[in-house]
Amino acid sequence: MPFISKIQRQSDYNLFSSHTPIVIDNGASYFRIGWAGETEPRVVFRNIVQRPRHKVTGETVTIVGDHDPALLKYFDCTRSGPRSAFDSNVVYQFEIMEYILDFGFDRLGANGSEIDHPVLITECVCNPVQSRSKMGELLFETYGVPSIAFGVDAAFSYKYNQQQGVCAKDGLALCPGFTTTHVIPFVDGEPVYKGSCRTNIGGFHVTDYLKQLLSLKYPYHLTRFTWEKVEDLKMEHCYIAPDYASEARLFQKGAKEAEEKTRCWQLPWVPPPTEEPPSEEEIARKAAIREKQGQRLREMAEAKRSSKINELENELHGLEFLLHQLEQVEESDVPAFLAETGYVSRQEIESARNKVMHSLRKAKGEPKTEQIDSEKADLATNEKYSLINIPDDMLTPEQLNEKKKQLSLKSMSEGRQRLKQKRYEEELERERKQQLEEEKRLENPELYLEQLHARYNDLSEKVDQQKRLKTNGGGHTNGNNLSGGVGRGERLSAAQRERMRLLTTAAFDRGKGEDTFGARDEDWQLYKLMSKDNNDDDEGPDEDEAELARISSRLQDLDPTFVPKLEASTSQPAEVPRFRPLTKEDFQIVIGVERFRCPEILFNPNWIGVDQVGLDEMAGVSMRRLPYKDEGLEERLTSSILVTGGSSLFPGIVERLEAGIRMIRPCGSPIKIVRALNPVMDAWRGAAFYASASQFHTQTFSRSDYYEKGEDWLRNYQLQYTL
């Protein structure tokens, strides 16, 4: 609707006299308010209220009706969603209703809290007296209206279309609304409410069903399926199928007609930028930059290495000078001299010098053979254990203790040297093997790769077999496992089963009578056999697994298509996730069978758990509820069926209703179904036309009647639509 300033609204409001009624169509979906006698309402907005908080100030604001999504980014709407004053089609939240009436009267142009105009407000069929009395109390006490009148929206729509010649005096009004669907029979132009019926199904449920189906179909676009957008999709694309089963089979077969009926909603999508291959100049420039950076790093490493060599040489010269001075010091002054230097003995100084020499050779990059020779020479120099070769009977008790220490130190030193020699030999052997493999690869790369694959397969099978043996105990069964499962005897290896046998028989062989196990030396030999630490299977890492890992790493470097096998514990190889760039089709929402599947719940409410009849069966239920039975009346009723309400805008609803009602009526019965001129606005227009009549004031409920008679009079109040 066009924007009208507040001054203009107040000016228009003052043009109407106090006798001009205000007409309100209080629907569960939209709120419409205007003046009696006009053809269009002045204000139309959604009948909802939202009270979010401002993200900066924390102030709570009230938003009534439609809102601008661009403004809501400044508010926190997580704790306060849109709220309606209706439960189905009955007003029960009058605090929210007060916000809506305030907004409606303000937009109409009222400049004060007092409304000095009569009010005609619509309500649902058979509205509970509690809701009607609360609405009267709100209008009288809060706004001070002089009088009010209540009328049914579907009845106003039928009377308006009757005056326009669309329907007859006798007929049925089918009103599929927002949350409910009503059927009201009309006899001689007056509604017969005793014959009306209702189901709790409407346009709200259609929208919610469509939202659920799209969310399940496209879970990655949930944020796109807002209520407003799904409502627009419903009104734009949904239709009623003449025959649901045949329409569904059409889409199931994938016929050409189904493709023509399928609609596509394209979401915003920006194609990713295409990366062009770099030019030769760019490649050369990047190579020059990398070479320059590498040269700089090499220079920095060389400078650091030179600095470290200088430091080590200075430290070595200092230690050698210290040893030279120590040789010139007398034996009695040695402790005092060592106390000043910070060392304890001459051997400690020589050990420090050897370490510095080793670090210096390593920094200079000298061959390792020289390093080992120097270490052997240092070892021969440092092994000055004077008490080792002297017999014990020639030594004092203190010298004997010192001899034990020297023996321990010597054995530890020899062990370290042997370990270093072993590691060095293993490293040499590894380097030799790598050099031989590299020569084979360079000589014949294809043959080398083939041999590597064969070696990998053999080792993989061997490792898997070893794992199965460790798990299943060599495939032997214990005789008791009849179900095919793996028992404890199958999970133990051969060595583990032998230890268990020794452990279980030890008590019988050695412990008969008195428990004397462990009293003899052979008992401890048996204990060693039973010890888990004596098991060769548990010592150290498995060489085959290490070799398999090395070959797998080598194949990954040489063969881009190589995929390592998964562990034997997995029953099936897991699918490797493949990622592909998103395309335009990934941002398309295809609406096919959902177009007619969602509105179908108007005729089959049990699809969404509502155990009630559909729209076509409601006509037969309403006619059966009439207080008088007349075959001619039923034919007149089916000859003038008016479909009104927002949900009657679905294409194909008239044809589907005609086919459904024809199935419950006798053969040859006259059936005529028409849609209202404007199913959304005709209720307000009929109410505005009714309120403009001069006799309308005799049908109102005044404030004095409210104070004198109370809600008991409202219980029996019924508007007479014939003026």
Image: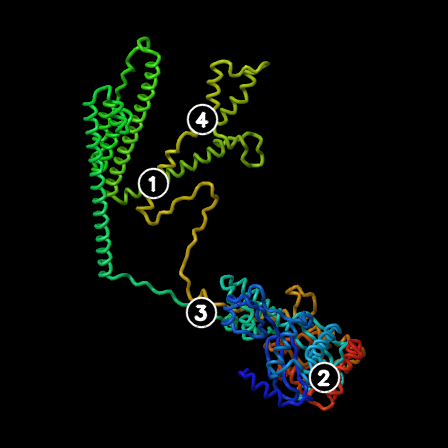
SS category of the residue bearing label 2: loop
Q: In the rendering, which numbered label is found on residue 268?
A: 3
SS category of the residue bearing label 4: helix
- Identity, as a three-letter code, of the amino acid under mark 2: Pro
- 574 or 693: nearer the viewer: 693
- 423 or 611: nearer the viewer: 423
- The residue indicated by pointer 1 is 551
Q: Mark 4 vs mark 2: which is more N-terminal?
A: 2
Q: Position of residue 609 (x, y in %)?
A: 66, 63
SS category of the residue bearing label 3: loop
> In 3D space, how far apart are the residues under numbered discs 4 and 1 (Cα atoms)?
30 Å
Q: Residues within 10 Å of mark 4 (few under 14, many from 20)?
A: few
Q: Mark 2 vs mark 1: which is more N-terminal?
A: 2
Q: Nearer the viewer, mark 4 or mark 1?
A: 4
Q: Position of residue 12 (x, y in %)?
A: 60, 88
Q: Mark 3 vs mark 1: which is more N-terminal?
A: 3
> In 3D space, how far apart are the residues under numbered discs 4 and 3 (Cα atoms)?
67 Å
Left or right position of 396 against 210: left
Asked if disc 4 and disc 3 are in contact, CB closer than 8 Å, the reply is no
SS category of the residue bearing label 1: helix
Q: In the rendering, which numbered label is found on residue 146?
A: 2
> In 3D space, how far apart are the residues under numbered discs 4 and 2 (Cα atoms)?
102 Å
> In 3D space, how far apart are the residues under numbered discs 2 and 3 (Cα atoms)?
54 Å
Q: Mark 4 vs mark 3: which is more N-terminal?
A: 3
- The residue indicated by pointer 4 is 533
Left or right position of 635 against 2: right
- Identity, as a three-letter code, of the amino acid under mark 4: Asp
Q: Nearer the viewer, mark 2 or mark 1?
A: 2
- Identity, as a three-letter code, of the amino acid under mark 3: Pro
Left or right position of 35 against 575: right
Give the answer, above or below, for where 159 lies relative to 462.
Answer: below
Question: What residue is rendered at 60% in x and 75% in y?
Answer: 46
